[in-house]
Amino acid sequence: MKKTYHLLFTLLVLSLTGHGQSKTTYLPEPGEGFSFNSGLLSVLDAPESFESDARSNSQSFQFMRDNVIGLSHFSVAYGLGYSAQFYHGNVRIDVAEDGTQTLVDLSGRDFISNRFATEYVDAAIELRYRGKVNRNGRYNRFYIGGCFGYRTDAYSYYKDAVYRVKYYQISGFNPLRYGVHIKAGRGPVNAYVYYGLSAIVVDGAMLPEWSEARPLSVGLSVTL
């Protein structure tokens, strides 16, 4: 009889132990260390005379280090990157030999390409949320973050049927940039939005008309 009680007790303990082991514990997925972001670029609060071309775009990449917050769905990531903004439109920046800048309105004129561009080295930080992984290894993600950049170059480029010119290191563009971004999706390709909080121009011939102009980029982010 005692052997029967011992057997039943052992089975009960094993059953309870097995039931406890059946509970699942969330193990965070490692966060991505690289992202490439590409989007269509528009200018908010630009002068009414400015006509943005559909070719306006922004490109950036970021190398990030991900730090999970405990055994949770959240993490904090930080890192460095590089970005370039290409503003195509009807405004040409011409620079004389003495450095004097002149704005030329190209409305109604035929040209092949016209843009001004800025490039920055960026420091980035993100608060990340990642959901549970499905059988295909995918999970929902929502990243919100910001960046702070230092300008490395700003140039103006113009080309028509008979003439082509490019001016490097154009003054007047903001030496610093900062803004916020969102990355959201399920797989390696995600929706991406960046809103610039800093002005595009802080000095030079484009003021005061461009003093309130801010960049907005909407596109895709590839995270690996």
Image: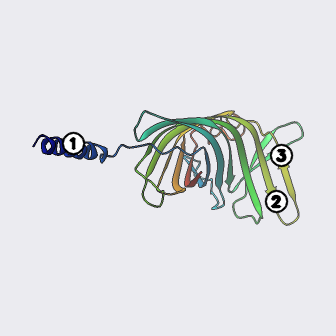
Q: Residues within 10 Å of mark 2 (few under 14, many from 20)?
A: some
Asked which quadrant contains residue 169, the reply is top right
Residue 197 appears in the picture as rendered:
no
Name the element at disc 2: strand
Residue closest to the eye, 224 or 42: 224
Residue closest to the eye, 80 or 132: 132
Residue 217 spot, x, y in % from top left: 57, 51
Residue 35 spot, x, y in % from top left: 61, 48
Distance, label 2 to label 1, CA atoms, is 85 Å
Asked which quadrant contains residue 208, the reply is top right
Residue assigned mark 3: 167
Which three-letter amino acid code belongs to the residue tagged 2? Answer: Lys
Which of the two labelled residues, at mark 3 and mark 2, occupies the earlier sequence position?
A: 2
Which of the two labelled residues, at mark 2 and mark 1, occupies the earlier sequence position?
A: 1
Q: Residue drawn at (48%, 57%), measured in percent from left and top?
A: 137
CB-based contact (under 8 Å), mark 3 and mark 2: no
Residue assigned mark 1: 10
Name the element at disc 1: helix
Residue closest to the eye, 116 or 132: 132
Mark 2 or 1: in front is 1
Residue assigned mark 2: 159
Which three-letter amino acid code belongs to the residue tagged 1? Answer: Thr
Residue 212 spot, x, y in % from top left: 56, 39
Which of the two labelled residues, at mark 3 and mark 1, occupies the earlier sequence position?
A: 1
Residue closest to the eye, 75 or 102: 75
Distance, label 3 to label 2, CA atoms, is 12 Å
Q: Residues within 10 Å of mark 1 (few under 14, many from 20)?
A: few
Which three-letter amino acid code belongs to the residue tagged 3? Answer: Tyr
- Drawn side of residue 199 relative to residue 169, left or right: left
Q: Is residue 3 above or below residue 111?
A: above
